[in-house]
Amino acid sequence: MTSSGTNSTGGEGRGDSGGPHSASPAWELLLPAAAGPVRGRGRALQSALREAVRSGRLVAATRLPSSRELAADLGVSRGLVTEAYEQLTAEGYLRSGQGAGTWVSGGVRAAARSVRDLAPRTPGARVDFRPGVPDLSLFPRATWAATQRAVLGRLPHASLGYPDPRGLPELREALAGLLARRRGVVADPERLVVCSGVAQATTLLGFVLREQGLASVGVEDPGSPEHASLFAATGLGATPLPLDGEGLALGPLRRSGARAVVTTPAHQFPTGIAYSAERRRGLLDWAREADAVIMEDDYDGDFRYDRAPVGALQGLDPERVVYTGSVSKSLAPGLRLGWLVAPASLTDRIVARKRTMDLGNPAIDQAVLADFISRGAYDRQLRRCQRAYRERRDAMVAALDEHFPGTEVSGIAAGLHIIARLPERYGSEGVFLGRAAGAGIALRPLSDCGDAGPEDGSVALVLGYAHLGVVDIARGVASLAAAQGLGSGA
């Protein structure tokens, strides 16, 4: 391969004709493209040359060899090189002038080459007791794949166009029947909106409330930190409202002047209580008196282990309650499929906002979920998860009783997490969490959810168990005890 030379026909030169960047680069980087299949060789050469500029291997102001010389070096026709130069000059990667040769443009900035994964994980954790994640290995891969094949085989071509922003009619009908049967929701398919999980349902409502002049929304305290951050993204503030043993305390709620509030009445997060019947009635009375709206986040309402789940609050007054839920706990959060059932007064505004936000959820995924529900596969999946998670909750309680005697487990037998309040003898929260982290054990203290924690400074934890096997739970709690310098039964 030549490394320098004089100008040739066409004025393209390289090598020894001036400038700090005039020395020829190692053109070997183009050899793989030149050796590729004849049919695609031209495009491959263009792609390789483009990538060399983007990556910085060919820096700005580098003078390229003439088309004749480069063609000879690479063993390709001169026409391929000329075409590549012309194409990249048109795109701005190269520049050329009559009699001045061809150069790498100074306007190209190499993009960062790293690809990061921002999924919420704890790198290096041996045991992760943080709540909120189901057992992803329970996802029914075979049944889902078979359903997808069947749906694709019969899905009309028209269904692959832009969908109704509310969702496919067949999915809204299937969800309406499911929610009415399992959760007691008054679910009109015309007022049901398929969303990318409860997160998008929350932001949809937030945007609409902001348009109506609200400045803030009441949130449970303690409660899910995600509610406040999602509303903040829509321009709404969050007003923390305290709980008592029956649910959201009505006195502070009335004094707050709030006209919208988020609740988790079936299984309050994180305390684990279920709102009492009296408190549910009182909350609806407040909404009517204040002309307010309640958002019901039914994040794990299907998972009650000691009795039938309490029906949704929305069923008592569908014109005051915005009902939200998803398949994130029953199937997988990665599906990004959820729903919102809106009061008539808010439906059109929410649908309009959904349309401008994303034009609707993926049609194929919606069609698969609709069939999955209609054929009874979703009910079977729920029963499978309920059995597994009930067993794991029992295993968590038993392990705590063995390794941390005296620990108080609060809340109803439901959901995917428990609250564990450790006796004072196990030390302060800061020391306890530090020892756990040092042993590679990820924990979420109750204080992360807005609760000040026990007055004596002892430890209160929100422990997730759904994503761990029974054996893993027992070993994990034993490891946690060992990290605190405790033996079995300490």
Image: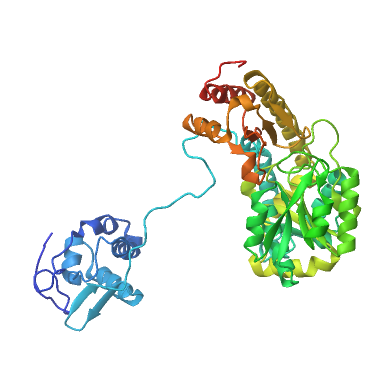
What colour-coding does the image apply?
A: rainbow
Q: Is residue 378 above or below residue 404?
A: below
Front residue (pair 266, 331)? 266
Q: Is residue 266 above or below residue 482?
A: below
Image location (x, y in percent) of residue 420:
68, 31
In the image, taking residue 398 as reference, residue 267 lies left or right, namely right
The image quarter containing residue 275 is: top right
Q: Is residue 305 above or below residue 234?
A: above
Residue 351 visible in the displayed image:
no
Instruction: Please give the name of the residue rendered at 21% of the width and 75% of the height, measured from the top-left corner.
Output: 102
Residue 192 visible in the displayed image:
yes
Front residue (pair 460, 1)? 460
Image location (x, y in percent) of residue 76:
23, 63
In the picture, the quarter occupied by the C terminus is top right
In the image, taking residue 138 as reference, residue 218 lies left or right, namely right
In the picture, the quarter occupied by the N terminus is bottom left
In the image, taking residue 293 as reference, residue 54 lies left or right, namely left
In the image, taking residue 12 as reference, residue 260 lies left or right, namely right
